[in-house]
Amino acid sequence: MLEAITWNTYFSTLAVGMAAYYIIIIVSYYPQEFRSLLSRRINKISQDRQQEEEQHHRRTDEKPTDHFEELEATVAELNGILGKAGQNRTSKEKLHLQLIQTLSNHTGLREPAYRVAVINFILENAEKQCRINFNETEIEEAWAAHSP
């Protein structure tokens, strides 16, 4: 019969039994201390929850930034700039400045994925609409230099 009991089962049962024994002793002989200990913990837990809820409300009350919407707006703005530059035969330097000024206004596009998408858009459409060739490093360096 004792051979069927593993050491793991024995120690688990012993731990549960000892915990129950000491809880009974504490509740029986020190009830006021036990209640004050519990009330402090419950108060602390409730205060922590209130703080977390307040922080959550602060975070959710702020206007969430949708980077895809900002990316679409930026691309539309850049498309307009490139279209006008193609019609007016704007110089490469002037177009470069206009593009950089536009990009420096969009702070949500600092993440590499959005940045690559915008740079690829500029490279493709500047050649199509304006017949001006930019290289990736020109735009990347200028955007980094004018970024806050």
Image (cartoon, rainbow, N blue to C red):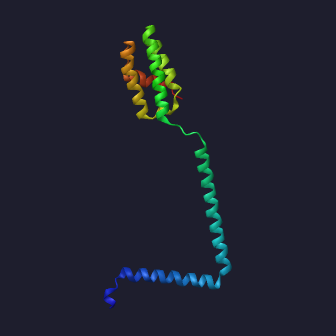
Which residue corresponds to the image point at 67% horizontal and 73% vertical from the top-left?
Answer: 36
Q: How many labels, in total?
A: 0
Residue 71, horizontal then vertical, whole percent: 46, 30
In the image shown, does 125 or 37 lie closer to the viewer?
Answer: 125
Residue 58, horizontal then vertical, whole percent: 62, 46
Identify the image quadrant of residue 26: bottom right
* In the displayed structure image, the side of residue 52 where residue 6 appears, left or right: left
Q: Residue furthest top?
A: 89
Residue 129, horizontal then vertical, whole percent: 39, 15
In the image shown, does 8 or 53 lie closer to the viewer?
Answer: 53
Which residue corresponds to the image point at 63% horizontal and 55% vertical from the top-left?
Answer: 51
Q: Residue furthest left?
A: 3
The answer to whether 141 is drawn above or below residue 16 in the figure is above
Which residue corresponds to the image point at 42% horizontal and 11% vertical from the top-left?
Answer: 86
Question: Image quadrant for the N terminus?
Answer: bottom left
The answer to whether 56 is drawn above or below residue 27 in the figure is above
The answer to whether 34 is drawn above or below residue 115 in the figure is below
Which residue corresponds to the image point at 49% horizontal and 17% vertical from the top-left?
Answer: 98
The answer to whether 66 is drawn above or below residue 60 in the figure is above
Question: Image quadrant for the C terminus?
Answer: top right
